[in-house]
Image (cartoon, rainbow, N blue to C red):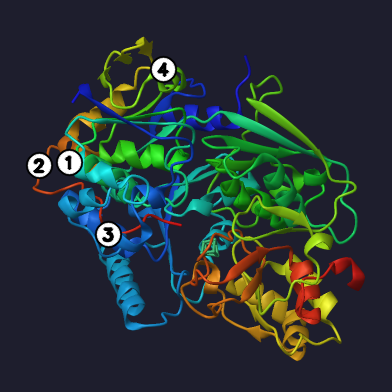
Amino acid sequence: MGKTFVEKVLGRKAGRAVTAGEIVEVVPDYAMSHDNTAAIAKTFASIGVARLYDPNLHVVILDHASPPPNEKFAENHREVREFVKKHGIQNFYDVQRGVCHQVMVEEGFALPGLLIVGSDSHSTTYGAVGAFGTGIGRSEMAVIMATGRIWLRVPETMRVVFRGTPPPGVSAKDIMLYAIGRIGVEGANYMAVEFAGEAVEQMSVSSRMVLANMAAEMGAKTGYVEPDEITLEYVRPRARREFEVVKSDPDATYVRVHELDVSALEPLVACPHAVDNVKPVSEVAGTRIHQVFFGSCTNARLEDFEVVARILKGRRVHPEVRMLVFPASQQVYLDALRAGYLEILAEAGAVILNANCGPCMGSHQGIPANGEVSLSTSNRNFRGRQGNREAEIYLCSPATAAASAIRGVISDPREFL
Amino acid sequence: MKLVRGRVWKYGDDVNTDVIFPGKYTYTVTDPVEMASHAMEDLDPEFAKSVQPGDVVVAGRNFGCGSSREQAAFCLKYAGVGAVVAKSFSRIYFRNAINAGLPVIQAPEAVEAIEAGETVEIDLERGELRCKAGRFSFPRLPEAVLGIFAAGGLIPYTRQRLGLAPREGEGTGTSGESSR
Ligand code: SF4
């Protein structure tokens, strides 16, 4: 019987043929941690090993509250810098570089067929280029520091096939919200999710990152898009090492296959306080918003800036709305600057901030006030996610965010195309 | 460690990490005894008061959903819970529990049969659960995972494998909320 992508990657790492449900002990190719590296370092110290198993296994990226908003975060960053220096971690990116998952892909750590773990739940993002990426706990990361090893259960695989070509104004974010609304926030619990179909084949790597990133919102252990020419063109000039494309066999076993037609899809919005509380934008249009958060590892890449700039060009952000803009990385910042997008956004009245997570999980730079509505291009809208339990978060595409910023109420972006 | 015997505390589906260990304590409460005293606080105030060592939590689908905080597994362990038997677990809870040294068993049919308050016996090594209604088998847990339970969690297990002497209070995993 054929093997799935995850069975192959984990089998190769374990040195034997494995099937879904088995547990393997493996050495990952990369292990990513961010601002939580300081806490992990303490647990590592409690193990009592003097040196890291392999400093080159680790990638450390400061992004969650960068630059630090208060002395607590500042101390935390200092501890991380001291730790990387002491242990000779070369793959270290300080506050100027960007959001961890974007940096992992941009810098060519995430590559087809590699096994990458991260102490962050959206490490599933690396599947956009055909890597096995998964989120792990802090103790587990500390043990990887000490031994290089981690146990993983080989997941079953669900296949999600997006049929058709999405209409204008409908993006990867809308497609993914559609899938999450149908499958549910626990629908892919423990599973690997493979995204396929014409809609995915036409997508850029940036758009595929939206799918793999938000696979975590269905409970998935990892998301995956089979590498093709688009993938290879993207990864070849960035790759830091040799890699080999790994694909599922045609007769691989899937626990479930969802076929979703996107050819007549409308722009969608995830309403408070669950990511699978998905409604067509037409149903919630007119809802007053106070803040627009255009950022995060989900939707703040160059193609997103292009769409937002197209909609905002020559228009103004509503006077009662704060539009906060966080490029996913410094590279995206520079590219958007050179393309003139940042000028358009600034002229429209948007606030452009540095490349970091910002208010995505409520650290700083734009916490909504009590009773306010935040419309976000990010991936989670749990109560309190952006730092205030009394605020409401709606999730949407960059186009919907831009259109709504102009009107001051949730609006259909197709009216601006 | 390999034979668990205790009274059943039975709950329904979707028991989330907020009711197992309230978010308001995640940064302030780190002492094991104090953590145990808040276990299941928002679901069943009786639980922390009368739970006995070896008792078994039995629940429905998706146990431990919600936030990925490691404390939701540690607090049950510190409360003396011998095992959690559920129809299914959220993925991160399942990992956190094993790493905390708290046995987690997926046995949907057994959950249907077990009654609240009865005494059950679980043989982790053989993969068998015995209750009033009969015997139920569940997939025998792999060697690697049994080793983690036996050592009392991932950190002590790692120290054991590396030949380091055990430490007092190690593996408590209370360094704060896991990633989100
Ligand atoms: S942008 Fe948000 S989801 Fe992404 S890594 Fe940062 S906090 Fe997490």
For mark 3, name the chain.
A
Residue under pointer 2: B166
Residue under pointer 3: A41
As helix, strand or loop, the secondary structure at mark 2 comes to: loop
Crowd tier of the residue under label 4, counting other residues whose Cα lies within 10 Å: few below 14, some 14–19, many 20 or above: some
Amino acid carrying label 1: it is Arg
Amino acid carrying label 2: it is Pro
Residue under pointer 4: B113
Residue under pointer 1: B159
Q: Are marks 4 and 2 on the same chain?
A: yes
Report the front residue among A63 and A215.
A215
User: How far apart in space, not on screen, are marks 4 and 1 (Cα)?
Assistant: 39 Å
Amino acid carrying label 3: it is Ala
Q: Are marks 1 and 3 on the same chain?
A: no
As helix, strand or loop, the secondary structure at mark 4 comes to: helix
Crowd tier of the residue under label 3, counting other residues whose Cα lies within 10 Å: few below 14, some 14–19, many 20 or above: many
Residue at the top extreme, as displayed: B134
Crowd tier of the residue under label 1, counting other residues whose Cα lies within 10 Å: few below 14, some 14–19, many 20 or above: many
Residue at 61% x, 34% y: name it. A246
A394, above or below A19, in the image: below
Lateral position of residue B120 relative to residue A265, left or right: left
Residue A186 percent location from the top left of the image? 57, 41
Residue at disc 4, CB closer than 8 Å to ligand 1: no
Total number of numbered discs in the rendering: 4
